[in-house]
Amino acid sequence: MIRLKTPVSVETVRTLKAGEKVLLSGTVYTARDQAHIRLQNETHLPFDLEGAAIYYVGPTPERPGFVIGSSGPTSAYRMDGLAVPLIRRGVRIMIGKGDRSPAFIEALKTLDAVYLMATGGAGALLAACIKSKKVVLYEDLGTEAVHALEVEDFPCYVAYDVHGGNLFKD
Amino acid sequence: MREIKLQAVTEAVKKAVIEVNYHLDNSLVGLIQKAKREEKGTLARSILKDILDNQAIAREGNLPLCQDTGMVVVFVEMGHATWISGDLEAAINQGVREGYAEGYLRKSVVAHPFNRVNTQDNTPAVIHYAIKPGDGFKLKIATKGAGSENMSLVRMLTPAHGIDGVRDLILDTVKQAGGKACPPIILGIGLGGNLEKSALLAKEALLRELDDVNPDPDLAELEARWLEDVNKLDVGPMGVGGTTTCLAVKINTYPMHIASLPVGINIQCHSARHTEVTL
């Protein structure tokens, strides 16, 4: 079990190996399909992408008194083509579920980034690790807006590492 | 003639969409517990534990099982001797609207394939109607997430493909879906009819009780055999490998054209959320 805190350095990212369990803490930015499409054209962002972690999630609405609703990962393959330009801009960790394209996996190797898998359909369990939430971009997208989440010991598994290691059976 | 009150339909839909999004079916929980006991891989077991812990948290009623609380599918079975005064479709959608608001469920429906504007209340539901003899009135209600629905398909095979051709298509589809469909999955297989009928058969197969037995002994045997075949694929929970890829295979059939063998494959993730209501 490895404890990680964001933002992460290239050196730290290189030490991660596929199959390892990671407990992630710090700031994690949410973005799904629509936010990724818009981010392609943004030159200035209100947050730093260097060493950043992006979580593919669209939570359910929170009940009064709750930080967030159910918050499990969405299928990551939909972001494959859109993620690589963000890795070029410094993103080091992406969190989602399911396998990804050969081109994306290659980009992780050449650009020093990792893909972590969180357990799909475990949105209630994962919500407990999210301590705060605020919108930082695209509020009009609702659940798909970019949120800054503060997470504590958020459980995930290294799915693809920078050395070509692969958690999935394919 | 028996009147079915629209208000009762709205209430039933509302209650159902909330209930299924917080309470995983007990027989499904039992199957996942059994799979966890039998699974060899440490990682696969760890993921099955996450799934079991998750449903226990959701059961307390504050957080839905999954953030994808689905698009609502309703199969209406209406007896010929019942009547409704007004707009049944509107009553069902009102139930969806109220349920998704009161249950703090995610609104995941957009109005148009390209402008992607959210309808804000998770309507409309996808509704199928059947008229049956008698004065019964039944609603089969599912809230279906997109992860597994996106991995589903219809393929028009030919008679020469036979049983092996269908099996190969199923195995290939599950393999391609991998972790994206959120395994362990349940497979709804529709064989026969035509293009749209095979898809409907597959969806209805997913709405069967997990522990029911197919009344056709040949199909019952096929369900067991294909379940075994799928579990040899080594896809495993969330695609990490293991013997727990699929929890159940359900096959529904219908007569078809002499030249056709339509196959609908509807994949259901481990968070199978559906129920039946009789009014």
Image: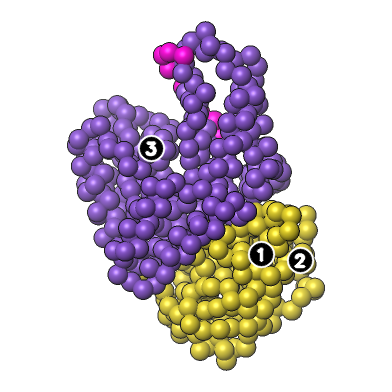
Chain colours: A yellow, B purple
Query: Looking at this rendering, what residue extends furthest in the front direction?
Result: B60
Q: Residues within 10 Å of mark 2 (few under 14, many from 20)?
A: some
Q: Amino acid under label 2? A: Lys
Alpha-carbon span between mark 3 and mark 1? 36 Å
- Of all chains, the one bearing label 3 is B
Disc 3 secondary structure class: loop
Query: Looking at this rendering, what residue extends furthest in the bottom direction?
Result: A11
Labels 3 and 1 touching (C-beta < 8 A): no
- In this figure, which residue is indicated by the disc labeled 1? A31
Q: Is residue A41 visible?
A: no
- Of all chains, the one bearing label 1 is A
Who comes first in sequence, dot 2 or dot 1? 1
Report the span colored magenta: B125-135
Alpha-carbon span between mark 2 and mark 1? 13 Å
Report the residue at 77% width, 64% height from top: A135
Judging depth in this view, the residue of B143 and B211 nearest the camera is B211
B134 falls in the magenta region: yes
Labels 3 and 2 touching (C-beta < 8 A): no
The quadrant in which residue B43 appears is bottom left
Residue A150 location in percent, x, y?
Answer: 69, 73
Judging depth in this view, the residue of B127 and B45 nearest the camera is B45
* Count of marks overlaid on the render: 3
Q: Amino acid under label 3? A: Arg
- In this figure, which residue is indicated by the disc labeled 2? A134
